Amino acid sequence: MPRFRETVRTLLRERLLDAAYEAVADRGFDKLRMAHLASAVGVSRQTLYSEFPSKEAVGEALFQRELERCLVGIQQGLDAHRDDLRAAVEAAVGFTLTLAGRNPLIKAMLTSTGEDGLLSYLTTRSAAAFDLATAMADAYVTEAWPTIDPVARELAVDAAVRLTASHIVQAGPSPEESARRVADTVVRVALSTGRERIPR
């Protein structure tokens, strides 16, 4: 029975997030109303607030879900080029920037206003997202390219995450060109110690 209740709660949470995603994509996060969200899913406001205590909690959950989905795509891009660091970084960054340009939620984030808007998850409240993306990338690079100097690896991963986020907030000429530039920078940093040669 506990497992059944947990399954039901998970399904409810996903339904709420799906409805919130549609509302934010259509009207923006600033116009999202908890009462409307509860009505759209057919639950009481009490049920909604038991899952998400505030509008900001909904925004955080939306962002976290999109970030996790993005990280899956990033890993797939890296997996396709494990023998070529430059190509791997370019593929991962290109995927991220292309997704950001097409994703209605990301577009809504970039046009939201106010300190509590979704944009803050890419700027003033981005620490958790940076930590998650950095940890995933660092673990992957450590396993896939173990000969990279640890200090250079840490700097390269940090550069990759921060430069990619910067290009999401302020888009460059094209996702492809931006990805090439980020990849060039990351590879130079990764090779900066001269300790080992890595595939590129």
Image: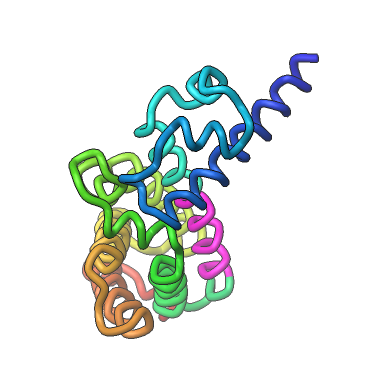
Colour scheme of the picture: rainbow
Is residue 83 rendered to the left or right of residue 114?
right
Is residue 30 rendered to the left or right of residue 81?
left
Nearer the observer, 90 or 57: 57
Residue 32, percent across and down? 39, 42
Is residue 130 rendered to the left or right of residue 72?
left
Res 100 visible:
yes
Q: Which image quadrant is residue 149 in?
A: bottom left
Q: Is residue 67 magenta?
A: yes
Is residue 140 rendered to the left or right of residue 12?
left
Residue 147, percent across and down? 41, 63
| Quadrant location, the C terminus | bottom left
> As displayed, is residue 128 above or below residue 177?
above
> As displayed, is residue 61 above or below residue 5?
below
Nearer the observer, 188 or 10: 10
Res 152 visible:
no
Q: Residue furthest top?
A: 1
Q: Residue furthest right?
A: 1
Q: Which image quadrant is residue 53 in?
A: top left
Nearer the observer, 142 or 60: 60
Residue 121, percent across and down? 30, 46
Q: Residue at coordinates 49% horizontally, 63% vertically from top-left?
A: 74
> As displayed, is residue 176 above or below residue 4?
below
Q: Is residue 51 magenta?
A: no
Q: Residue at coordinates 19% horizontally, 44% vertically from top-left?
A: 114
Q: Start and end of the magenta stretch?
A: 66-79
Nearer the observer, 30 or 170: 30
Q: Residue at coordinates 25% horizontally, 58% vertically from top-left?
A: 155
| Quadrant location, the N terminus | top right
